[in-house]
Amino acid sequence: MQHLVFVYGTLRQGESNHNYLTDGELLGRFDTLPEYALHDLGPYPGLVAGHQSIHGEVYRVDEATLAKLDILEDVPVEYRRETIETPYGMAWIYIYQDASRLDAIIDSGDWCQRI
């Protein structure tokens, strides 16, 4: 079975965990509706509900890759998966769950432009 996944942090091209998507197919870049907030947690971002548009990429992945992503994202403990509409179809997005760690917002909504 194939899945679409929207990635916005360390899984994006050029970032530290992009190798998890080696078997995936990049469908394109996508900016979400302004319904989220992106926070800098140090080595990775946390995405929660808010009022920002988030920049990312949409990939088509297989069941095995999605399972690896769930392990990386520590689903259902640290993150949970929800679906969002993209130009490529409905895609999974990882939502951060520990609001107590959120303090440094990334104003641009783009993890790759955080510095």
Image (tube, grey):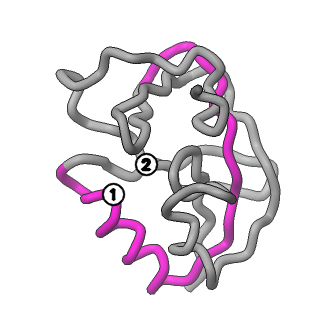
Q: Position of residue 61 (x, y in %)?
A: 60, 76
Does residue 95 lie above or below 62 as drawn?
above
Does residue 23 lie above or below 39 as drawn?
below
Circle 2: residue type: Tyr
Does residue 4 lie above or below 38 as drawn?
below
Q: Does residue 110 appear to the left or right of 20 in the view shown?
A: right
In the depicted view, which residue is nearer to us: 24 or 103?
103
Q: Which residue appears at 66% of the width and 58% of the height?
A: 14
Q: Earlier in the sequence, mark 1 or mark 2?
A: 1
Circle 1: residue type: Glu
In the depicted view, which residue is nearer to us: 90 or 40?
40
Does residue 50 lie above or below 44 as drawn?
above
Quadrant housing the N terminus:
bottom right
Q: Which residue appears at 29% of the width and 21% of the height?
A: 102
Residue beneath label 2, please? 94
Q: Which residue appears at 43% of the width and 26% of the height?
A: 39
Quadrant in the picture for residue 34: top right
Secondary structure at numbered mark 1: loop
Q: Which residue appears at 76% of the width and 43% of the height?
A: 30
Q: Position of residue 46 (x, y in %)?
A: 39, 35
Residue beneath label 1, please? 73
Residue 51: say if magenta: yes
Secondary structure at numbered mark 2: strand
Residue 102: assigned label: none
Q: Nearer the viewer, mark 1 or mark 2?
A: 1
Q: Which residues are magenta?
A: 49-77
Q: Position of residue 98 (x, y in %)?
A: 21, 32
Quadrant housing the C terminus:
top right
C-alpha distance separating marks 1 and 2: 8 Å
Q: Quick check: marks 1 and 2 in contact, CB under 8 Å?
A: yes
Q: Position of residue 3 (x, y in %)?
A: 58, 72
